[in-house]
Amino acid sequence: MIKGVFSLLAGIRLLFVEPDLRSVLWRMLALLIALMVAATMAAFQGLDYLATIWLPQGDAWYWQLLSAVVWVLALLLSLVTGALAYVALGSAAVAPWLDTLAVRTERLHGVGESAANSDSWMMQVTASLANSIRPLGGLLAWGAVALLFIWLPPLATAIWTYAGIRFLGYELMDTTASRQAWAFHRRKQELNEQRWFYIGFAGVAMLLLMVPVLNLLVIPAAVVALSSRPYTADQALKG
């Protein structure tokens, strides 16, 4: 788990230390900012809805305390949802730049084939969105479970946060997995075999997505971090 945490933090550091990587980051930044603003606005709309159905009514001191706790949980749930939407859409929207980032990182570390994706911009964006379908199905299944406990805010929030971390694992590995030609079952195998690494990796990503400015770095930093990890030829053949 600790390795996953430090891996993402190292990716952020490399983004600024290496000029070749930093130049790619500047190209995608405006689009990421626009998507983050849209996701944040949607998250606060969700917060208003959850506050309406969750916040208890009453004047006693304990109702006020309970209201504060429930409001924090509603805020967390809304922010997690907004963060997931941002990563899913952001990863697709800047997919060609992420591929360039992966190529440059691989060359920097002597990892992989370093062949850039020659598909058109739209094809790369469409492929990234298609890769999100299966993980999104799993996320929605967990979401249905969370809805069963919607009247128990702590449990519903915990379930949705776990589901979000799992979903982030798939989303953040998409660029490097696609470059290895990994199908969904190979990606799932990677997440299961390296479970604790990805829990730490996606978990700290989730936390950083809640922090203004740093949240813009999560997607490109994840690509840099995972592109620095060696993958053997026999692993790629399992895709």
Image: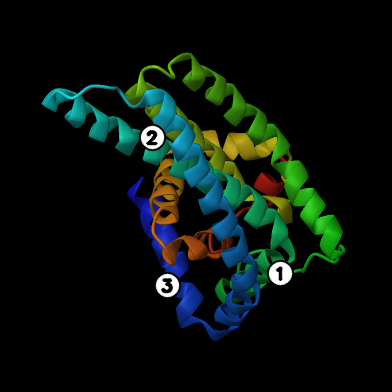
Dot 3 surroundings within 10 Å: few (below 14), some, or many (20 or more)?
some
Q: Which residue is mark 2?
A: 74
Dot 2 surroundings within 10 Å: few (below 14), some, or many (20 or more)?
many
Q: Which circle's residue, 2 or 3, is located before the other in the chain?
A: 3
Which quadrant of the rendered structure holds the N terminus?
A: top left
Tag 1–tag 2 contact (CB < 8 Å):
no
Q: Secondary structure at mark 3?
A: helix
Q: Which residue is mark 3?
A: 13
- Would you place residue 179 above or below residue 191 in this image? below
Marks 1 and 3: which is nearer the front?
3
Residue in the picture at 70% in, 33% down = 134
* Distance from the alpha carbon under mark 2 to that under mark 3: 32 Å
Residue 62 visible (yes or no):
yes
**Which mark identifies residue 114?**
1
Residue in the picture at 54% in, 24% down = 142
Which quadrant of the rendered structure holds the C terminus?
A: top right
Marks 1 and 2: which is nearer the front?
2
Q: Nearer the viewer, residue 120 or 194?
A: 120
Dot 1 surroundings within 10 Å: few (below 14), some, or many (20 or more)?
some
